[in-house]
Amino acid sequence: DDEMGESHPLNLMLTNVNSLCGTRTTKICLTSMSKSALNEMVSTELSLLPRITRSLANILHHKTKGSPLFVKQVMMELYKQRLLYPSLSRRRWVWETNKILDMKIPDNVATFITNTFDRLSFEVVSALVVLSCFGASADISLIQVLEKEIEQPLIAPLDDAVAHSVLGKRNGKLYFMHDKLQEAAYSKMKPEERCLHHNRYGLALGFVAVRERDDRLLLTAVTQINHGGPQAVIDDEQAVVVANLNLDAGKKAMYMSDFFAAHSFFEHGISYLRLRREYWNEHYDLSLELFNLAAKCAFMNAEHD
């Protein structure tokens, strides 16, 4: 709750669901763990009796206020700093109580895990910047294709980020462990250059999608290009190429009965064509098809204005 104000997208969505759709929602408040619950968690993780881990658990509870995600991140940081480590002589996990007590930890997990981002290598950060352009997560197969097309190491550095708990990997996807990490990676790009990155990655994937007739990849690629927008287009020829890609993506979306997405693709295609003053004369067939299909989708979406 402390990270989501009234203007947060999730709260706005829930408000719309309640007011517009009449759907009842139930809010479940997840409270922080008690000292005993946290001690049980630490005891299980370290395979030690609760009476042995109680001192460590009490310190963690004081520093993290019982947030489960925060506890996990702090314990991993303790291990990296050799403040929590397995002892061969004692045959169990041990910890440096005084040093842990003196350890400075931010008030919230977002700040803490964002700070870990700053200790990564340049290659890892560069790969994370690329991944951040695709949102909170992306398919590993997509990143593999992109790595080959833009000739930049991505998979190995991102695996390193997984090892540092910046990313997670599950079900063929790579995902940021916290939205603040994705924001931190995205902010590494200058605001005026972000559109160029989106355009570059989208075009690289778009050419592969067309060549291999991969509809799913095409939709992802064109969406990425559109994040860049017309301001990222380098010349008139590229504008026409992108307009055609939007036309193809819109048709695929219409075939899947996703008329809202289709309308967005057609409208974006038109915006790229408008970069050319004489687009109706020079690209009549493309212009006519984009405008006609955009009108059809608008009708299906009850957008009659």
Image (cartoon, rainbow, N blue to C red):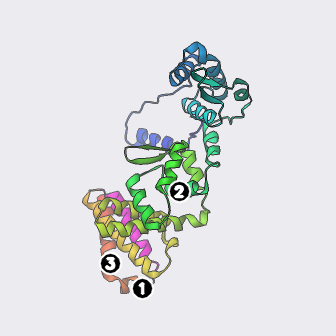
Label 1, residues with CA under 10 Å away: few <14, some 14-19, many ≥20: few
At 61% from the left and 29% from the top, the residue drawn is 85
Q: For the residues labelled 2 and 1, say whether their Cβ atoms are less than 8 Å apart.
A: no
Q: Is residue 46 left or right of residue 80?
A: left
* Mark found first going from the N terminus, 2 or 1: 2
Q: Amino acid at mark 1?
A: Glu
Queried whether the magenta region covers residue 14, the answer comes back as: no
State which quadrant residue 116 falls in.
top right
Give the labeled residue for mark 2. 127
Examine the rendering and report whether any part of residue 95 can be seen.
yes
Measure how far apart labels 3 and 1 are at the Cα level: 13 Å
At 60% from the left and 61% from the top, the residue drawn is 189
Q: Which residue appears farthest toward the left when viewing the image?
A: 255
- Asked which secondary structure carries label 2, the reply is helix
| Magenta stretch secondary structure, dominant | helix
Give the labeled residue for mark 3. 286
Q: Which portion, as a residue range, is magenta?
A: 258-277
- Asked which secondary structure carries label 3, the reply is helix
Q: Is residue 216 left or right of residue 61?
A: left
Give the labeled residue for mark 1. 278
Q: Amino acid at mark 2?
A: Ala
In the rendered view, tell whether residue 64 sits above or below residue 166. above
Q: Which mark is residue 194?
A: none
